[in-house]
Amino acid sequence: MNRTISRTFDILNFIASRDGVTLKEIIENVNMPKSSAFDIVHSLLELNFIEPNFYNDKKYELGIKAFALGQKYTQKKSFVEICAKHLMPLADELERTTFVGVRSGTDVIYVYKYMGEGAKLATCNVGSTHPVYTTALGKSLLAYLEPNIQMDLLNKISFIEKTNNTIKNKESLLIDLRDTKKRGFSIDNKENEKMMICYGAPIFDGSNKLIAAISFSDIKNPVLSDEEIGSKIRQCALDISTELGYSGGPFWEE
């Protein structure tokens, strides 16, 4: 591979991973001579692939041309198509039904469904809704909100017990949401339906904004632990998010 192209790609990836980097930081982290880094950075500036940070012109961030190219790529594929490509193989592997959901107020709307090979339960249909606090989809959609927005929504929830396991109040839900964000996946342990256990994870877009969640549902698997299943699902969510342009890296504590 051409060394200059390879170095240019390394610089762009490094800049994309930060909120603004100096030339010195680029040289130290990408490990290249100062003269080479200087030439590439200034070429990228002239081409508008990077630009000076608005608050500090000694730092660089991705420019409008990089954004435009990314938008052209993501526009080629629909959101649901990207999700389906990643969800279907995992649903078959886990023998579960997988869903994609988006939040509408304090409810989750199901926008995609696929019943994996060997899945036994699949009670929700596309277009149906459930409360955010009783579902793995909803918990993932709540856990990654800004604290003030999250609290505003929690204050609007009327907690109604759908099963004996349903979360009963705001305080208990907050604890659950903290655990969800820490491990990177949510769990609905027979909280929405008596026989159903469900695992979910968040989806982020190219601006690193939370836009949806995925989930996998069925009866309890006696072989795989929650962590084993959850780790597969959060990685699947990260893969989908990355294909949508997300650059934030793992959204769980490692």
Image: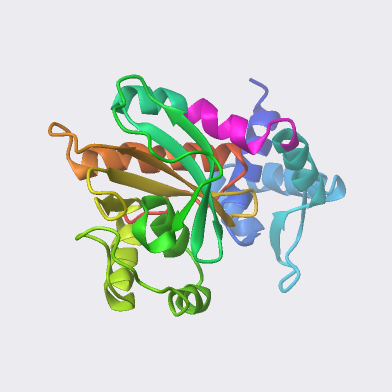
| In the image, farthest residue toward the right | 46
Choose between 226 and 74: the one closer to the eye: 226
Choose between 245 and 84: the one closer to the eye: 84
Give the image location of residue 121, x and y in percent.
Answer: 31, 33
Choose between 254 and 102: the one closer to the eye: 102
Q: Answer yes or no: is residue 231 visible.
A: yes
On the picture, is 138 further left or further right than 220? right
On the picture, is 95 further left or further right than 87? left
Q: Answer yes or no: is residue 39 visible.
A: no
- Residue at 64% across / 62% down in the picture? 20
Give the vertical position of 211 relative to 7 (above or below): below
Please tell me how many numbered marks the rendered image carries. Answer: 0
**Quadrant of the image occupied by residue 253:** bottom left
**Quadrant of the image occupied by residue 33:** top right
> Does the magenta-highlighted stretch encompass residue 126?
no
Give the image location of residue 63, x and y in percent.
Answer: 77, 52
- Residue at 61% across / 49% down in the picture? 205
- Residue at 38% across / 47% down in the picture? 200
Give the image location of residue 79, x and y in percent.
Answer: 63, 38
**Main secondary structure type of the part rendered in magenta:** helix
Q: Split into 4 quadrants, where in the image is the N terminus?
A: top right
- Residue at 17% across / 40% down in the picture? 225
Tell me the magenta residue range.
Answer: 75-87
Give the image location of residue 142, x and y in percent.
Answer: 45, 63
> Does the magenta-highlighted stretch encompass residue 79?
yes
Coloured how? rainbow
